[in-house]
Image (tube, helix red, strand yellow):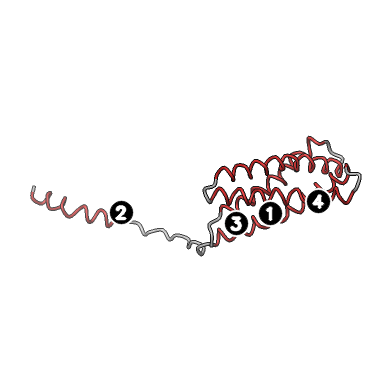
Amino acid sequence: MDKLLELELTAPAAKTAAKRKPAKRRKPLPARGTHATSVKRWAAFGVGLMLVLSAALNGFANSLHSPVAWAGWLMGLAVPVIVLVLAKVAGEKYRAGQKPVAWFAGGSGIALLFLSVHHCSHSIAALTGSPVALALPTSIGIDCGLVACEVALISEGRE
């Protein structure tokens, strides 16, 4: 009985030593901030690309309906810039705790965003010959993508 007790006292240490497996090596993590930098670059690229696309499509749509084509182009080019500015203002005011101003700026931006989606849809339909219903998802992707990329830039931490 004493030998059994002695074996039980020494056995757990022997069992755990035998059961231990070598630790798996973990892959090294990327340098700190690399992901954030990558997201910022893609978001900034997205803002630029979608701003140009939206401006061109809005300009084309407005020029089709305007008696003065250059005025329609100017108005159309300004729409996505205004949406971008309102998104930036709304985001910054929200971060600063001024929520009523943020909601007002954001609501104004959303109203203009709906107008931009409408104009982009009609431009895409006119340029491609497709029905407006099929051009709508593309225009939503362009205009809402612009705002989404701007939100991604705003929500990144300050450096």
Labels 3 and 1: the sequence-earlier one: 3
Amino acid type assigned to the residue bearing label 2 in the image = Lys
Q: Are marks 3 and 1 in contact (CB under 8 Å)?
A: no
Q: How far apart are marks 1 and 2 (CA)?
A: 52 Å
Examine the rendered structure and indicate whether residue 111 appears above or below residue 14. above
Of the two numbered discs 3 and 2 in the rendering, the one whose residue sits closer to the viewer: 3
Badge 3 local density, few (<14 within 10 Å), some, or many (20+)? some
Q: Are marks 1 and 4 in contact (CB under 8 Å)?
A: no
Labels 4 and 2: the sequence-earlier one: 2
| Foreground of the two, 60 or 9 | 60
The residue sitting at 49% across, 61% down in the picture is 29
The residue sitting at 60% across, 54% down in the picture is 153
Where is mark 1, residue-wise? 46
Give the label on residue 56, or none: 4
Badge 2 local density, few (<14 within 10 Å), some, or many (20+)? few
Q: Quadrant of residue 126?
A: top right
Farthest residue to the bottom: give it: 31
Q: How far apart are marks 4 and 2 (CA)?
A: 67 Å
Q: How far apart are marks 3 and 2 (CA)?
A: 43 Å
Q: Are marks 3 and 2 in contact (CB under 8 Å)?
A: no
Labels 1 and 4: the sequence-earlier one: 1
Where is mark 3, residue-wise? 39
Where is mark 2, residue-wise? 19
Q: Distance between the residues labelled 3 and 1?
A: 10 Å
Amino acid type assigned to the residue bearing label 1 in the image = Gly
Give the label on residue 88, or none: none
Q: What element carries label 3?
A: helix
Question: Residue 17's x, y, as percent?
Answer: 27, 57
Q: On the rendered structure, is 95 left or right of 130?
A: left
| Foreground of the two, 50 or 61 | 61
